[in-house]
Image (cartoon, rainbow, N blue to C red):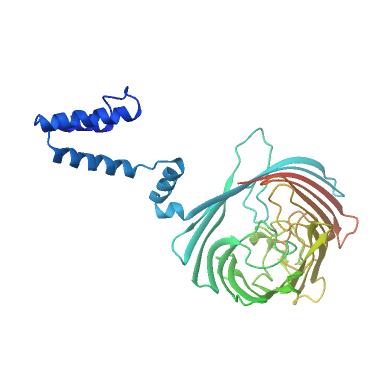
């Protein structure tokens, strides 16, 4: 009997029976019938009030609009989901290479990168990313489209944890993007450092000072008479706004100390390019040829960015430079780059653009040859020449890019190389 009374109350109170009665009349008819049921003793007014309160409470918990329903779903999501962001990019490339070594080659390539960053708490976050690549090379995530439609490899691009115990201190460990302010003259932009870093910075206007120091394992040498190869590096610098924000100056002075590279054999170094000076006759994978010099490199970098106005259009532009000197060998030990940028530093929104023109010269023993720009003069050191880049955003997060290299060897001027790279990049 109780079940029957509840069903009657629900049907009448929600208008299920009298849905054919339009508008206000349906509500009035339901109310009249309920009063008759109370009068005949089938149900009590208290039961009507109790069940009506339950129905009203349930109706209040159901969001009325789409925006309210979306907000409720977001509110109910687990905290780790709300604190996680994803990002990636896909690059399609057409490339043409022509050099004095007999290469006259066109090829198509892709690069795919995708990863996430998750905030564990107010002080700790982790990040992880995957990338394409034809090998585990530290300087390239490109994959050439060839070999009868073979499946392509995916590698761990980065895996890092960052701890911020104070707003001015960052502690980073794992595999991560370069922590140093530099161009890609010494460090290719695809390189992800292995190791541990501590960074400190001030937030005082108008000048921000910073310092970075890190330990980076290069090679684990497990022979009885060998020592592990590692890098100890540090950088100090400052960022300043000049003249009522008319310009911004970024500076950095870095020191890179590669330990136990001198005397290492070509066979023990998987990524060396053979452009450094060797004792003995060099051959790839040689067990007798050894690196002749240490690498203790000091490198200042600077960039000056101006906010200029042409008519009613604001066009930022910048000049930049980087220099390095290896303190050990005494000759063939320096590298330098100078250039300018016209347009936006980051090209992302439709209509954004930038033009870069730069000249670089990197001598044989200016730096360990595994890490400089992999597209500059066939990778490695002992190269000079210029590069021109033009980027344009066709739409939001869709960028067209044209990159031209004209380089040659310093030790053999006849080894000329030209590269043209045409890209379309999709960011998501």
Name which residue lies at 80% across and 53% down.
389
Name the outermost residue toward the right.
414
The answer to whether one can see residue 199 in this image is: yes
Residue 379 screen position, x and y as percent: 75, 56
Residue 146 placement, left or right of 125: right
Q: In which quarter of the image is residue 311?
A: bottom right
Name which residue lies at 28% across and 31% down.
27
Residue 423 screen position, x and y as percent: 74, 44
Q: Quadrant of residue 206?
A: bottom right
Residue 101 placement, left or right of 248: right
Residue 23 screen position, x and y as percent: 35, 29
Name the outermost residue toward the top.
20
Name which residue lies at 15% across and 29% down.
36
Image position of 34 with respect to 346: above or below: above
Q: Which of 393 and 218 is in front in this view?
A: 393
* Total residue callouts: 0
Q: Quadrant of residue 329?
A: bottom right
Residue 424 screen position, x and y as percent: 72, 43
Q: Nearer the viewer, residue 279 or 142?
A: 142
Name which residue lies at 18% across and 38% down.
48
Residue 291 placement, left or right of 132: right
Image position of 363 with respect to 283: above or below: below
The answer to whether one can see residue 131 in this image is: no
Quadrant of the snapshot with the N terminus: top left
Q: Nearer the viewer, residue 58 or 114?
A: 58
Residue 413 placement, left or right of 257: right
């Amino acid at each position: 009997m109780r079940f029957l009374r509840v069903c009657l109350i629900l049907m009448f109170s929600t208008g299920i029976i009298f849905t054919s009665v339009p508008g206000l009349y349906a509500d009035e008819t339901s109310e009249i019938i309920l009063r008759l049921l109370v009068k005949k003793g089938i149900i009590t007014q208290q039961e009507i009030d109790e069940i009506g309160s339950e129905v009203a409470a349930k109706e209040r918990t159901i969001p009325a609009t789409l925006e309210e329903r979306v907000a409720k779903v977001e509110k109910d999501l687990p905290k780790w989901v709300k604190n996680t962001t994803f990002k990636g990019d896909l690059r399609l490339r057409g490339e043409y290479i022509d050099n004095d070594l007999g290469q006259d080659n066109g090829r198509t390539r892709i690069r795919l990168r995708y990863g996430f960053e998750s905030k564990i708490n107010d002080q700790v976050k982790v990040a992880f990313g995957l990338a394409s690549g034809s090998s585990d090379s530290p300087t390239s995530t490109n994959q050439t489209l060839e070999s009868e439609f073979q499946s392509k490899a995916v590698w761990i691009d980065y895996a890092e944890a960052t701890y911020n115990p104070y707003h001015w201190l960052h502690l980073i460990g794992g595999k991560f993007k370069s922590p140093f302010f530099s161009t890609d003259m010494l460090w290719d932009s695809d390189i992800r450092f292995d190791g541990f870093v501590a960074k400190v910075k001030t937030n005082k206007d108008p000048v921000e000072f910073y310092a970075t120091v890190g330990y980076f394992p290069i090679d684990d040498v497990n022979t009885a008479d060998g020592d592990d190869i590692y890098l100890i590096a540090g950088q100090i610098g400052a960022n300043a706004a000049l003249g009522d924000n008319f310009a911004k100056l970024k500076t950095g002075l870095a020191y890179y100390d590669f330990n136990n590279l001198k005397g290492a054999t070509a066979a023990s170094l998987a990524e060396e390019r053979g452009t450094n000076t060797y004792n003995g006759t060099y051959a790839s994978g040689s067990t007798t040829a050894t690196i002749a010099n240490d690498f203790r490199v000091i490198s200042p970098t600077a960039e000056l960015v101006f906010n200029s106005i042409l008519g009613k259009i604001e066009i930022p532009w910048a000049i930049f430079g980087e220099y390095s000197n290896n303190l050990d060998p005494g000759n063939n030990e320096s590298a330098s780059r100078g250039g300018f940028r016209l347009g936006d530093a980051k090209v992302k929104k439709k209509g954004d653009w930038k033009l870069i023109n730069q000249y670089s010269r990197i001598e044989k023993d200016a730096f360990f040859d595994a890490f400089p720009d992999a597209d500059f003069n066939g990778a490695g050191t002992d190269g000079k020449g210029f590069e021109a880049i033009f980027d344009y955003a066709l739409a939001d997060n869709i960028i067209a890019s044209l990159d031209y290299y004209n380089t040659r060897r310093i030790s053999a001027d006849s080894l000329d190389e030209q590269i043209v790279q045409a890209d379309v990049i999709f960011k998501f």
